[in-house]
Amino acid sequence: MVEGFHHAALAVSDLPRAVSFYEEVLEFAPIGPDNPENTMQTANYYWMDIGDGELMNLADRPDVTPNHPEEKDDPHLAFRATEDEINTVERRLVDRDVEVHESRTSIYFHDPDGNFLELTNWDGPDT
């Protein structure tokens, strides 16, 4: 039986830049490379702590060419946040000249490698 979400993995073309973005903009806590003997410059993967036992794995892929979806219904990765946290992150993104799209409960944006991300405080579909 599936117990829950463990981690998401995203391909990034510049591992130090990606770690910096996720740490400074989204405040994910750096855990470290896949192998403790590696440095950020020699690692193939770098782990970030999202919180609540959930992890992000950034995979170093120098030749990555992600697609660039533009609509909120396009494939993306969404993170839960409060309205205040969403507003704070939106200011950080604007300060970095990152284009932000808004909806009633979310913001949508691209990371430096074009991965499409969402921050939302939506409670989910009514069941």
Image (tube, grey):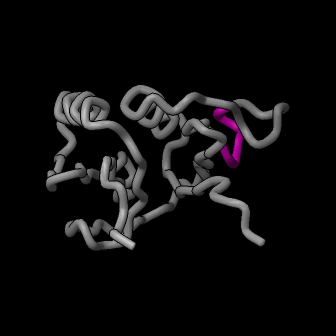
Return the residue nearer the eye: 64 or 3: 3
Q: Residue 61: percent from the left, percent from the top? A: 57, 56
For this view, does 113 lie left or right of residue 99? right
Q: Residue at x 25, y 53 (%)?
A: 108
Q: Residue 74: percent from the left, percent from the top? A: 30, 73
Specify start and end residues of the magenta stretch as a single range.
40-46
For this view, does 115 lie left or right of residue 3? left
Image quadrant in which you'd find residue 78: bottom left
Q: Is residue 53 above or below residue 61?
A: above
Q: Quadrant of the C terminus?
A: bottom left
Q: Residue at x 51, y 33 (%)?
A: 28
Q: Residue 70: percent from the left, percent from the top? A: 21, 66
Q: Quadrant of the N terminus?
A: bottom right
Name the dominant secondary structure of the magenta segment: loop
Q: Is residue 126 above or below residue 79?
A: below
Q: Residue at x 39, y 52 (%)?
A: 113
Return the residue nearer the eye: 46 or 61: 46
Q: Residue 6: percent from the left, percent from the top? A: 67, 54
Image quadrant in which you'd find residue 92: top left
Residue sitting at the far front: 127
Q: Residue at x 31, y 54 (%)?
A: 122
